[in-house]
Amino acid sequence: MTILIVDDAPDNIRMLANILIQDHHVIFATSGQQAMESAVANRPDLILLDVMMPEIDGFFVCSWLRENEKTCDIPVIMITAMNDSSAETRGFAAGAVDFLTKPVNPPVVRARVTAHLVLKKQRDELVRLNEQLQEEIMECTRLEEKLREQAEFDELTGLPNRKLFNDRLHQAILMGERKQRNFALMFVDLDRFKWVNDTLGHDAGDTLLIEVARRIKGVVRKSDTVARLGGDEFTVILLDILHESMAELVARKILEELCTPFLLKGEEVVISGSVGVSLFPADGSNAQELVKNADSAMYQAKHSGRNTFRFFSDEIDSKAHQRMKLEGEMRLAIQKEEFFLDYQPKIRLSTGRMTGVEALVRWNHPKEGVLSPNQFIPLAEGSGLILLMGAWVLRTACRDAMCWANEGFADLKLSVNLSALQFREGEKLLQMVEETLQETGFPAGNLELEITESMMIGNMEQVSITLQKLRGMGVNISMDDFGTGYSSLALLKDLPIQVIKIDRSFVRDLEKDDKSADFTSAIISMAKQLGLKVVVEGVETAAQLQILREQGGDEIQGFFFSPPLGRGAFLDLLQGQLPMGGGASL
Ligand code: C2E
Ligand code: MG
Ligand code: MG
């Protein structure tokens, strides 16, 4: 034990040192300043401190030691002159633990010093034990957390395990019941997991499972649950399913991910998966039923040749597979040249002459016959095929229009519909339009691209930029199906749009229903004020035509003048060889 003796009189130091040197390691200081420095540097176990010193006295040194973090625990015994009771009071206040009076009595010094060293030792031990206890408590909490994690999460993949999956499933059912929401439960099983384990070893199997977990998670939303029940058995809970086609889309994406080769031990390995889907509440109102049915759907998927999905319900399953089949056929339809365009004229009311034409795509399906765009465009959007198809439509329409221009109809305006997905491609769309115009030589000023209000949803800024750039190329923009979306006037004011097309649902009831007539009349006069051209779609009768003429519409498009026609028939019409239907009375 180290004892620091502080006294300005060397004799006093010597005397105290003599008393203590036998049992302890003694160091000393001869001023207050030295005492503080030595205490910090040597950290003695006890300090004997003279009160009366020049410059810095013992009271100051004691207070200072108490306040210093490094020295605050060192017990200080003060040495005062006999009968100075006020010194004791000040000394205790400064933080001294005890007093000795001069001249000192050796046995008393030894006894007091020993007592305080023992006390200090015990206190230090207490502090150490306390720290140790706290550390142990923390370790316990850490262990508990880890145990809880192990109880709820799969150690290998970090995904929720069976227990947590069951909790989440019950929660989804409760929420579904309370808020009337549908959700889907999927069972995903790898088709070649056993093979990987047997031939490449368990390490490779583990790597595969980790990668599979990552890929499946990448396909679903954050709020959905991907769990591993064990082995190669994964489950997915897809919350808030609006339509079964959403589950179908996710199932297909998962299958696609599982078909993409995995890199295992430096080798590219192709496995695939089988997915079974049950829907809440249609396929079960409780967890047990939903699990059983998703599992049985998964087995059916396996039995029907793997690398596929099955819905539990036969009806939904056959609809989903029909869609999938059609989508697969659509991929080939472009190469097989099964798409073709019909053309529907637009007539200027003031002159009765054809001013423009809208290109409308059709699919001549080998078995189903001619399909209308409403039957395949949504599918083409879901698969991204619309981008290829849209480019084909624009190119073909521009080529045809160039032919008509060469026949002497160079003023004819050509309208082509854009889909939301095409439009969202921004830069790619601009590039595609530019290339097509260049390649076909069709003048940008004669091209009109039709967009719908629903395409404006979301990123207005991006939409506006894309439209401005199209405008910059000289292309005209037309707002199709106006009145069926949110018919926002603000949109028309802020965006570079030149034409609005009033949807045919308003024309249909024009004669019977004053509201429809009010609507068309209001839109036409508002469009006039904004300097927009108004095209009215779906005009079928002379009476409708008359009303629209009175209301001041600019152009009409509809069966009254002509239905959409094939390329040849349209050219005939253009050249005036066909009788112009109701056009005669225009
Ligand atoms: P839309 O752009 O509003 O096209 C007008 C639709 O109304 C066409 O239907 C046309 O045949 C139909 N129609 C025209 N006049 C009349 C009429 O007097 N009475 C009735 N009842 N109907 C009439 P279609 O050809 O079935 O096209 C449906 C929709 O598919 C189009 O609506 C358009 O949004 C979309 N569409 C067509 N071709 C393409 C395309 O190449 N790309 C994209 N993205 N969409 C297309
Ligand atoms: Mg259109
Ligand atoms: Mg329309």
Image (cartoon, grey):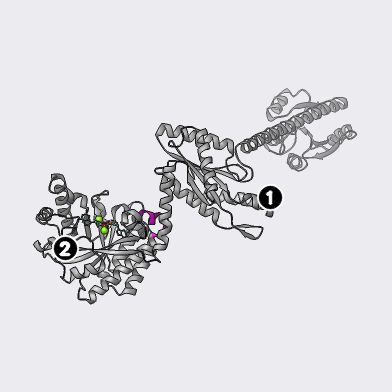
Q: Find residue 557 and report its horizontal and vertical position in percent.
A: 19, 59
Q: Quadrant of ligand 1?
A: bottom left
Give the vertical position of 499 relative to 273 (above or below). below
Dot 1: few (<14), some (14–19), or many (≥20) neighbours within 10 Å? few
In which image quadrant can residue 46 be found?
A: top right
Q: Nearer the viewer, residue 225 or 38?
A: 225
| Residue where numbered disc 2 is placed | 347
Q: Is mark 1 within 8 Å of ligand 1?
A: no
| Residue where numbered disc 1 is placed | 202
Q: Nearer the viewer, residue 186 or 466?
A: 186
Give the vertical position of 113 relative to 323 (above or below). above
In which image quadrant can residue 176 be found?
A: top left
Q: Quadrant of the C terminus?
A: bottom left
Residue 6 magenta: no
Q: Find residue 89 and report its horizontal and vertical position in percent.
A: 70, 24
Q: Earlier in the sequence, mark 2 or mark 1?
A: 1
Secondary structure beneath label 2: strand
* Residue 179 horizontal side relative to residue 251, left or right: left
Q: What residue type is disc 1 on?
A: His
Residue found at the far front of this picture = 367
Residue found at the far right of this picture = 22
Numbered range of the magenta stretch: 378-385
Q: What residue type is disc 2 on?
A: Ile
Residue 211 in sight: yes
Residue at x 73% of width, y 23% of height: 85
Residue 427 in sight: no
Tags 2 and 1 touching, CB below 8 Å: no
* Residue 493 horizontal side relative to residue 53, left or right: left
Count the marks: 2
Secondary structure beneath label 1: helix
